[in-house]
Image (cartoon, helix red, strand yellow):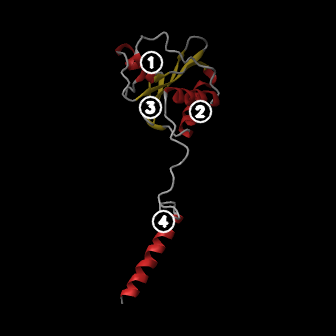
Amino acid sequence: MGTRRTVAVAAAVSAFMTVTAGCGLVGEDGTAPEPSPEPTVPFTRETVAGETAAAAGTAGLPAGDTSTAALPAGDWHTCVAPWTGDVPAAGAAGAFEAAVRQLRQQEWEIVSSHAEQDVTFRTLAKRGWKVYARHYTAEGSGTGQIVSLTAVEDGCELPKEIRADYEDPA
């Protein structure tokens, strides 16, 4: 009886090892597989700025302003990635929505969407950041309308005088 039990246990262990090795849970020698050689890329201000700029460009928005130089000084500049552009009025709404779609294709999730008076708001989130996308239908600095895609890292301490510009009003 003991031999039968030993054979059954050995067969069960062998089947388990075959299944787990086939699923990648353990290697053929019974050890855990090596970790992936590709580390998770940090989601930095530069990464977020690149994604918002790429979304804007792909959506057909003109080159935008990414500077924080005219804003209040402080360490908060390291946790904000702004993009603002003056867009021809005729295509501003469509380009704004196309930029939001591009961000969605980069795995940004919409957490808020609404309109108030002359502003359309979309707030998207991804990996500890939020993009506050805005389309202002009132005339901008030229003959167009303002579109902004401002990314703010969660927990960023924004100065009081600009906090309302970057937060979701709803």
Q: Nearer the viewer, mark 1 or mark 2?
A: 1
Upstream in sequence: badge 3 or badge 4: 4
Q: How many marks?
A: 4
**Element type where label 2 sits in the image:** helix
Q: Is residue 53 left or right of residue 15?
A: right
| Picture residue at 53% right of the left edge, 15% below the top | 67
User: What's the residue type where badge 2 is placed?
Assistant: Ala
The residue labelled by disc 1 is 77
Upstream in sequence: badge 2 or badge 4: 4
Query: In the rendering, which numbered label is found on residue 129?
Result: 3
Mark 3 Cα within 10 Å, few/some/many (few <14, many 20+)? many
Q: What is the spatial separation of the Cα atoms under label 1 and label 4, in whole angstroms?
A: 48 Å
Query: In the rendering, which numbered label is found on residue 12?
Result: none
Mark 2 Cα within 10 Å, few/some/many (few <14, many 20+)? some
Q: Nearer the viewer, mark 1 or mark 4?
A: 4
Q: What is the spatial separation of the Cα atoms under label 3 and label 4, in whole angstroms?
A: 37 Å
**Element type where label 4 sits in the image:** helix
Q: Mark 2 near mark 4, Cβ–Cβ under 8 Å?
A: no
Q: What is the spatial separation of the Cα atoms under label 2 and label 3, in whole angstroms?
A: 20 Å
**Residue 45 image position (x, y, % from top left):** 49, 26
User: What's the residue type where badge 1 is placed?
Assistant: His
The residue labelled by disc 2 is 98
Q: Nearer the viewer, mark 3 or mark 1?
A: 1
**Element type where label 1 sits in the image:** helix
Upstream in sequence: badge 3 or badge 1: 1
Q: What is the spatial separation of the Cα atoms under label 3 and label 1, in whole angstroms?
A: 14 Å
Upstream in sequence: badge 1 or badge 2: 1
